[in-house]
Amino acid sequence: MNEKEIQAVKQRFGIIGTNSQLNRAIEVALQVAKTDLSVLVTGESGVGKEFFPQIIHTFSTRKHGPYFAINCGAIPEGTIDSELFGHEKGAYTDAKSDRKGYFEIANGGTLFLDEVGELPLQTQVRLLRVLETGEFIRMGASQVQKTSVRVVAATNLDMRQAIRSGRFREDLYYRLSAVEIRVPALRERKEDIPLLFRKFALDFSEKYRMPAVRLNEEANQLLRSYYWNGNIRQLKNVAERISIIETNHDITAETLRRYLPQNEMETGLQPASTFQTTGDPYLNERELLYKVLFDMRKDITDLKQQMAQQSAQPVQPQVVGVGTPMVKVGAPGDMPNEEFQQVEEVRDEPDSIADMERETIRRALEHYHGNRKATAQAIGMGERTLYRKIKEYGL
């Protein structure tokens, strides 16, 4: 496949970059599009995996058939089977009528299963059957139905680790990944970073009707050396914030640095973070919980020491000014009941895994400004599980 064909695909789908790994991923997508093989697109969150199912569908023999993109991590566990395979009236409490699932309505077309690693094990069994035989059964029904659907899946998980953890079926993984396309992280495409920033700056200039921001050479070097943990999505966010906030549109490295979290500067290693996991993301959750507990205990110990020092000092009432009431600083026993109760509440330590888990999730959500996807990745928890935990703990 020649460079001209690849460039035509980039222009058609708005893909920016000249990186050889990116070009190879597009080339593989075009080659596999002519077949009916299942494809698994892998890569970190925010790298642009969603373009590849569209490329595959557009250049396949199914291009005139339906195309649906389903985010498996955003559908509640109790309804995912109904969404994919449909249900009969009365199959469950809220099933007021028959409903077709995506595998039925996408017959003859393509289904893009994003975040496929978040599927429950029961749904994985159903998916494996339809991939192998083309057969499925609606929930609450007994009649087997046939379908012809091309499946392209995507995930940002380490699937082999998920298999070892018992979170994903090995047979389904091999069935989905007849062809695997890896999309490179932004830090692996350093030559593309200034191009992407310039494209985003021009887009936001047109959107907000203001001059486009420009980076000097030093700022461009900083842009290329940054780790970009959030990949293209994070770069676009930075470009938008700079475009809106900065009145001087000639951006220096000093100005740019204010928009880049310092813990993600290029060091050759993945950036350290309070919520960063290493190794097995599914085995580290308990370690994170204990770390939060130890941090809380340290805070409580420091508070106790401060209170002990205060109570050991003699109390000297002081007159702040003429006509101003005296302010007394004393031991906890001298505090009003309400204030003393608050201090006692601070002394209470979480005494269960659930308490630690709730605090871990709360801190992670606060750290990532409520971004559930980033929070789930940081603490090594599936997005579906995180949604359930947020609801369970009232967060």
Image (cartoon, helix red, strand yellow):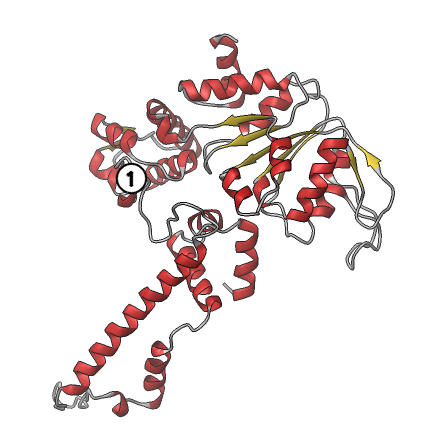
Q: Residue at x 57, y 42 (%)?
A: 117
Residue at the spot 45% in from the left edge and 32% down from the top edge:
47
- Three-letter amino acid code at disc 1? Glu
Q: Which residue is mark 1?
A: 246
- State the SS at label 1: loop
Residue at image x 57%, y 47%? 167
Instruction: Report whether residue 236 is seen.
Output: no
Q: Mark 1 Cα within 10 Å, few/some/many (few <14, many 20+)? A: few
Question: Residue 239: which quarter of the image?
Answer: top left
- Near-viewer residue (210 or 107): 107
Find residue 269 and report its horizontal and vertical position in percent.
Answer: 30, 38
The front one of 10 and 88 is 88
Looking at the image, which is closer to me, 335 or 160?
Answer: 160
Drawn side of residue 381 relative to residue 217, left or right: right
- For this orientation, the residue located farthest to the right is 143
Total count of labels: 1
Note whether residue 301 is visible. Answer: yes
The residue sitting at the front extreme is 164
Q: Where is residue 266 shown, x and y percent of the image? A: 27, 36
| Residue 232: image location, x then y, percent | 42, 33
* Residue 315 relative to residue 149: left or right: left
**In the displayed structure, does residue 251 sit left or right of residue 204?**
left
Relative to 353, does residue 48 appear above or below in the rendering?
A: above
Question: Would residue 40 be found to the left or right of residue 365 on screen?
Answer: right
Toward which corner of the image does residue 59 lie, by quadrant?
top right
The image position of residue 254, as x and y in percent, is 20, 38
